[in-house]
Image (cartoon, rainbow, N blue to C red):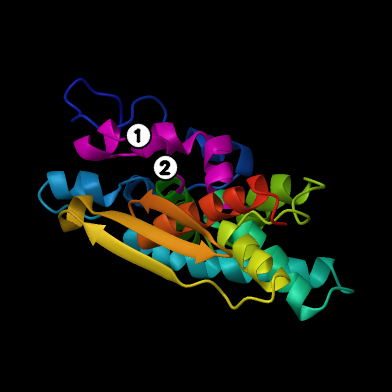
Amino acid sequence: MAADAAEPPGTPQGDPGGFLAAFGVAIDPGLLELALTHRSWAYEHGGAPHNERLEFLGDSILGQAVTVKLYRDYPALNEGELAKRRAALVSTVALAEIARGLGLGDELRLGRGEELTGGREKDSILADTVEAIIGAVYLSTDPETTAGFVRQLIEPLLADPDRFTVSLDPKTLLQEEAAARGLPHPPYTTTGTGPDHDRRYTARVSVDGVTGTGVGTSKKGAELAAARDAVEQLRSAGRR
Protein backbone atom coordinates (compact mmCIF):
# COMPACT_ATOMS: atom_id res chain seq x y z
CA MET A 1 0.00 0.00 0.00
CA ALA A 2 2.95 2.34 -0.39
CA ALA A 3 2.25 5.57 -2.23
CA ASP A 4 2.85 4.92 -5.90
CA ALA A 5 1.73 6.58 -9.10
CA ALA A 6 0.64 3.18 -10.38
CA GLU A 7 -1.81 2.57 -7.52
CA PRO A 8 -5.38 2.07 -8.76
CA PRO A 9 -8.17 4.49 -7.87
CA GLY A 10 -9.62 3.83 -4.45
CA THR A 11 -6.21 3.08 -2.89
CA PRO A 12 -5.22 5.45 -0.07
CA GLN A 13 -1.92 7.28 -0.19
CA GLY A 14 0.46 8.38 2.57
CA ASP A 15 1.37 6.37 5.67
CA PRO A 16 -1.00 3.39 5.95
CA GLY A 17 -1.38 2.29 9.53
CA GLY A 18 -0.03 5.53 10.92
CA PHE A 19 -3.17 5.82 13.03
CA LEU A 20 -1.93 2.85 15.09
CA ALA A 21 1.20 4.60 16.37
CA ALA A 22 -0.55 6.04 19.42
CA PHE A 23 -1.68 2.58 20.52
CA GLY A 24 1.71 0.92 20.54
CA VAL A 25 0.56 -2.05 18.46
CA ALA A 26 2.01 -3.39 15.25
CA ILE A 27 -0.10 -5.19 12.65
CA ASP A 28 1.27 -7.49 10.02
CA PRO A 29 1.34 -5.33 6.84
CA GLY A 30 -0.62 -7.88 4.84
CA LEU A 31 -3.34 -8.10 7.49
CA LEU A 32 -3.49 -4.32 7.74
CA GLU A 33 -4.02 -4.01 4.01
CA LEU A 34 -6.69 -6.70 4.15
CA ALA A 35 -8.47 -4.96 7.05
CA LEU A 36 -8.66 -1.76 5.03
CA THR A 37 -9.94 -3.45 1.86
CA HIS A 38 -13.69 -3.17 1.27
CA ARG A 39 -15.45 -5.80 -0.81
CA SER A 40 -16.25 -3.20 -3.49
CA TRP A 41 -12.51 -2.79 -4.17
CA ALA A 42 -11.98 -6.55 -4.13
CA TYR A 43 -14.78 -7.09 -6.66
CA GLU A 44 -13.20 -4.61 -9.06
CA HIS A 45 -9.81 -6.32 -8.73
CA GLY A 46 -10.58 -9.86 -9.76
CA GLY A 47 -12.25 -11.03 -6.58
CA ALA A 48 -9.29 -10.20 -4.35
CA PRO A 49 -9.59 -10.91 -0.61
CA HIS A 50 -11.41 -8.30 1.48
CA ASN A 51 -12.00 -7.52 5.15
CA GLU A 52 -15.28 -9.31 5.93
CA ARG A 53 -13.67 -12.35 7.58
CA LEU A 54 -11.52 -10.09 9.75
CA GLU A 55 -14.64 -8.09 10.57
CA PHE A 56 -16.35 -11.29 11.74
CA LEU A 57 -13.41 -12.09 14.01
CA GLY A 58 -13.06 -8.55 15.32
CA ASP A 59 -16.75 -8.27 16.15
CA SER A 60 -16.50 -11.20 18.55
CA ILE A 61 -13.30 -9.93 20.17
CA LEU A 62 -14.74 -6.43 20.55
CA GLY A 63 -17.86 -7.72 22.28
CA GLN A 64 -15.89 -9.84 24.72
CA ALA A 65 -13.39 -7.11 25.60
CA VAL A 66 -16.11 -4.51 26.17
CA THR A 67 -18.18 -6.96 28.23
CA VAL A 68 -15.25 -7.80 30.51
CA LYS A 69 -14.34 -4.15 31.00
CA LEU A 70 -17.90 -3.15 31.89
CA TYR A 71 -18.28 -6.12 34.25
CA ARG A 72 -15.11 -5.17 36.12
CA ASP A 73 -15.58 -1.40 36.11
CA TYR A 74 -19.26 -1.29 37.10
CA PRO A 75 -19.84 -3.89 39.84
CA ALA A 76 -23.06 -2.21 41.00
CA LEU A 77 -24.85 -2.37 37.64
CA ASN A 78 -27.35 -5.13 36.89
CA GLU A 79 -27.34 -7.24 33.74
CA GLY A 80 -29.81 -4.99 31.91
CA GLU A 81 -27.80 -1.83 32.51
CA LEU A 82 -24.56 -3.55 31.53
CA ALA A 83 -26.19 -4.76 28.31
CA LYS A 84 -27.38 -1.25 27.45
CA ARG A 85 -23.91 0.18 27.96
CA ARG A 86 -22.34 -2.54 25.88
CA ALA A 87 -24.86 -1.92 23.08
CA ALA A 88 -23.98 1.79 23.13
CA LEU A 89 -20.25 1.09 22.92
CA VAL A 90 -20.34 -1.49 20.11
CA SER A 91 -23.07 0.08 17.97
CA THR A 92 -22.44 1.03 14.36
CA VAL A 93 -22.71 4.70 15.28
CA ALA A 94 -20.17 4.38 18.10
CA LEU A 95 -17.68 2.44 16.00
CA ALA A 96 -18.03 4.93 13.15
CA GLU A 97 -17.23 7.69 15.64
CA ILE A 98 -14.09 5.81 16.64
CA ALA A 99 -13.16 5.35 12.97
CA ARG A 100 -13.51 9.06 12.25
CA GLY A 101 -11.32 9.87 15.23
CA LEU A 102 -8.63 7.62 13.76
CA GLY A 103 -9.03 9.00 10.25
CA LEU A 104 -9.83 5.53 8.92
CA GLY A 105 -11.93 6.91 6.09
CA ASP A 106 -8.79 8.15 4.37
CA GLU A 107 -7.11 4.75 4.69
CA LEU A 108 -9.79 2.62 3.02
CA ARG A 109 -9.47 0.81 -0.28
CA LEU A 110 -12.86 1.29 -1.94
CA GLY A 111 -14.34 0.51 -5.34
CA ARG A 112 -15.34 3.30 -7.70
CA GLY A 113 -19.01 2.99 -6.84
CA GLU A 114 -18.40 3.44 -3.13
CA GLU A 115 -16.05 6.35 -3.81
CA LEU A 116 -18.74 8.09 -5.82
CA THR A 117 -21.41 7.55 -3.16
CA GLY A 118 -19.35 8.78 -0.19
CA GLY A 119 -18.25 5.39 1.10
CA ARG A 120 -15.43 6.89 3.16
CA GLU A 121 -18.04 8.57 5.37
CA LYS A 122 -20.60 5.75 5.62
CA ASP A 123 -21.16 4.61 9.19
CA SER A 124 -21.54 0.95 8.21
CA ILE A 125 -18.27 0.81 6.26
CA LEU A 126 -16.34 2.68 8.93
CA ALA A 127 -17.71 0.51 11.74
CA ASP A 128 -16.94 -2.69 9.86
CA THR A 129 -13.39 -1.48 9.27
CA VAL A 130 -12.83 -0.89 12.99
CA GLU A 131 -13.89 -4.48 13.66
CA ALA A 132 -11.59 -5.72 10.89
CA ILE A 133 -8.67 -3.76 12.39
CA ILE A 134 -9.37 -5.40 15.76
CA GLY A 135 -9.30 -8.80 14.07
CA ALA A 136 -5.99 -7.95 12.40
CA VAL A 137 -4.48 -6.85 15.73
CA TYR A 138 -5.56 -10.14 17.29
CA LEU A 139 -3.94 -12.21 14.55
CA SER A 140 -0.78 -10.08 14.66
CA THR A 141 -0.32 -10.01 18.45
CA ASP A 142 -2.11 -11.89 21.24
CA PRO A 143 -5.45 -11.80 23.11
CA GLU A 144 -4.29 -9.56 25.96
CA THR A 145 -2.69 -7.00 23.63
CA THR A 146 -5.87 -6.95 21.57
CA ALA A 147 -8.08 -6.48 24.64
CA GLY A 148 -5.89 -3.55 25.66
CA PHE A 149 -6.20 -2.11 22.17
CA VAL A 150 -9.99 -2.33 22.37
CA ARG A 151 -9.98 -0.64 25.76
CA GLN A 152 -7.97 2.23 24.31
CA LEU A 153 -10.37 2.52 21.38
CA ILE A 154 -13.45 2.88 23.59
CA GLU A 155 -11.82 5.12 26.22
CA PRO A 156 -13.02 8.37 24.55
CA LEU A 157 -16.57 6.98 24.47
CA LEU A 158 -16.47 6.08 28.15
CA ALA A 159 -15.18 9.56 28.98
CA ASP A 160 -18.31 11.17 27.49
CA PRO A 161 -20.67 11.92 30.43
CA ASP A 162 -23.73 11.73 28.17
CA ARG A 163 -22.72 8.47 26.52
CA PHE A 164 -25.16 6.27 28.40
CA THR A 165 -27.99 8.72 28.99
CA VAL A 166 -28.72 8.84 25.25
CA SER A 167 -28.23 5.54 23.47
CA LEU A 168 -25.89 5.57 20.50
CA ASP A 169 -27.89 2.77 18.89
CA PRO A 170 -31.04 4.15 17.22
CA LYS A 171 -32.67 0.70 17.18
CA THR A 172 -32.27 0.38 20.94
CA LEU A 173 -33.56 3.89 21.41
CA LEU A 174 -36.60 3.19 19.24
CA GLN A 175 -37.33 0.04 21.23
CA GLU A 176 -37.25 2.14 24.39
CA GLU A 177 -39.62 4.65 22.81
CA ALA A 178 -42.00 1.83 21.86
CA ALA A 179 -41.84 0.26 25.31
CA ALA A 180 -42.66 3.60 26.93
CA ARG A 181 -45.88 3.60 24.91
CA GLY A 182 -46.75 0.03 25.84
CA LEU A 183 -46.02 -1.15 22.30
CA PRO A 184 -44.08 -4.26 21.22
CA HIS A 185 -40.67 -4.10 19.59
CA PRO A 186 -41.20 -2.49 16.17
CA PRO A 187 -40.68 -4.81 13.19
CA TYR A 188 -38.53 -3.78 10.23
CA THR A 189 -39.26 -4.38 6.55
CA THR A 190 -36.05 -4.44 4.54
CA THR A 191 -35.56 -4.89 0.80
CA GLY A 192 -32.40 -4.98 -1.30
CA THR A 193 -31.64 -3.98 -4.87
CA GLY A 194 -28.60 -4.11 -7.13
CA PRO A 195 -25.77 -6.62 -7.66
CA ASP A 196 -24.09 -8.33 -4.70
CA HIS A 197 -20.98 -6.15 -4.88
CA ASP A 198 -22.97 -2.90 -4.87
CA ARG A 199 -26.22 -3.77 -3.13
CA ARG A 200 -28.44 -1.10 -1.56
CA TYR A 201 -31.00 -1.77 1.13
CA THR A 202 -34.11 0.18 2.10
CA ALA A 203 -35.67 -0.37 5.52
CA ARG A 204 -38.93 0.87 7.01
CA VAL A 205 -40.19 0.74 10.58
CA SER A 206 -43.47 2.07 12.02
CA VAL A 207 -44.17 3.14 15.61
CA ASP A 208 -47.13 5.06 17.00
CA GLY A 209 -48.29 6.44 13.66
CA VAL A 210 -44.93 7.42 12.20
CA THR A 211 -42.84 5.48 9.68
CA GLY A 212 -39.08 5.80 9.55
CA THR A 213 -37.22 5.06 6.33
CA GLY A 214 -33.52 4.41 5.89
CA VAL A 215 -31.14 3.43 3.10
CA GLY A 216 -27.77 1.72 3.49
CA THR A 217 -25.22 -0.63 1.98
CA SER A 218 -26.18 -3.30 4.52
CA LYS A 219 -29.43 -4.39 6.15
CA LYS A 220 -28.06 -3.31 9.51
CA GLY A 221 -27.15 0.13 8.23
CA ALA A 222 -30.53 0.62 6.57
CA GLU A 223 -32.40 -0.41 9.71
CA LEU A 224 -30.30 1.89 11.88
CA ALA A 225 -31.08 4.78 9.55
CA ALA A 226 -34.79 3.92 9.59
CA ALA A 227 -34.82 3.76 13.39
CA ARG A 228 -33.04 7.11 13.62
CA ASP A 229 -35.61 8.65 11.26
CA ALA A 230 -38.51 7.27 13.30
CA VAL A 231 -37.07 8.55 16.58
CA GLU A 232 -36.55 12.01 15.10
CA GLN A 233 -40.14 12.07 13.84
CA LEU A 234 -41.53 10.98 17.20
CA ARG A 235 -39.58 13.68 18.99
CA SER A 236 -40.35 16.44 16.52
CA ALA A 237 -44.04 15.56 16.84
CA GLY A 238 -43.78 15.80 20.61
CA ARG A 239 -44.68 12.15 21.15
CA ARG A 240 -42.16 11.44 23.88
Q: Nearer the viewer, residue 111 or 163?
A: 163
Split into 4 quadrants, where in the image is the C terminus?
bottom right
Q: Residue at x 62, y 43 (%)?
A: 23
- Return the residue at label 1: 118
Residue 133: x percent and y percent?
46, 52
- Report the amino acid beneath label 2: Lys
* Left-right relation of 39 to 128: left
Q: Residues within 10 Å of mark 1 (few under 14, many from 20)?
A: few
Q: Residue furthest top?
A: 5
* Left-right relation of 192 to 187: left
Q: What is the span of residues highlighted in magenta in the rendered image? A: 94-123
Residue 50: x percent and y percent?
27, 54
Q: Nearer the viewer, residue 94 or 9?
A: 94
- Report the amino acid beneath label 1: Gly
18 over 25 or under it: above or below:
above
Q: CA distance from mark 2 to mark 1?
A: 7 Å
Query: Are dots 2 and 1 in contact, CB under 8 Å?
Result: yes
- In reply to whether residue 53 is colored magenta, the answer given is no
74 over 44 or under it: above or below:
below
Q: Residue at x 37, y 67 (%)?
A: 189
Q: Nearer the viewer, residue 83 or 66?
A: 83
29 over 195 or under it: above or below:
above
- Return the residue at label 2: 122
